[in-house]
Amino acid sequence: MMNPLTELTETKIEGSLQAIVERNIREHPMFPVEFDGRFFEIRSFYIWIIEHKLPTGLWQKFFYPVYEMYRGEIDLDSSFPIIKIRYFSKNRDDEEYNSFDEALNKTFQKLKGYKFDEMKDFKYELHYRLE
């Protein structure tokens, strides 16, 4: 059986998944990361695509971001080194854009300064012990 993604990865047609991923990697090579030797913060986002049916019967696509933040601590000084990671996520369906590129660029510009609510946006916490 052939891998259904083979065709996607081999094509370079503008608008294909591979072309979009390659273009975005060139335009936005990294997400903001802060690390001071013990505490770290990584911010990222993804874009949702929604289709609304217009009164004319046509469908229109809208794009909106979901902001994410991973905040954690790496404690290598203790006898049992632990990595703690807290995950925050905020769905911003009030920031609606008409094109994927516009949503991508505006969200990337806002990402570093976006304020997460410590209570409302918190989703879960993970603990990893290093051995």
Image (cartoon, rainbow, N blue to C red):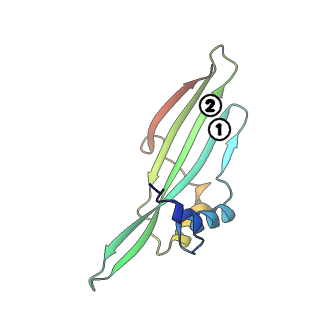
Q: Which residue is mark 2?
A: 73
**For the point 67% across and 54% down, which residue is it?**
30
**For the point 63% across and 64% down, which residue is it?**
22
In the rendered image, the quadrant that contains the C terminus is: top right
Residue 70: quarter of image: top right
Element under label 1? strand
Q: Is mark 1 in CB contact (under 8 Å) with mark 2?
A: yes
In the rendered image, the quadrant that contains the N terminus is: bottom left
Residue 109 located left or right of residue 126: right
**For the point 72% across and 36% down, which residue is it?**
36
**Placement of 38 over or under 119, stated as above or below:** above
Element under label 2? strand
Q: Picture coordinates of residue 16 (x, y %)?
A: 53, 70
Which numbered circle lies on residue 40?
1
**Placement of 76 over or under 8, stated as above or below:** above
Q: Nearer the viewer, residue 1 or 48?
A: 1
Residue 19: quarter of image: bottom right
**Placement of 127 over or under 20, stated as above or below:** above
**Placement of 55 over or under 51, stated as above or below:** below
Which numbered circle lies on residue 3?
none
Q: Picture coordinates of residue 95 (x, y %)?
A: 46, 65
**Residue furthest top in the image:** 79
Residue 78 located left or right of residue 8: right
Mark 2 is surrounded, within 10 Å at the Cα level, by few (under 14), some (14 to 19) or many (20 or more) other residues, namely some
**Residue furthest bottom in the image:** 56
| Residue type pointed to by label 2 | Glu
| Residue type pointed to by label 1 | Phe
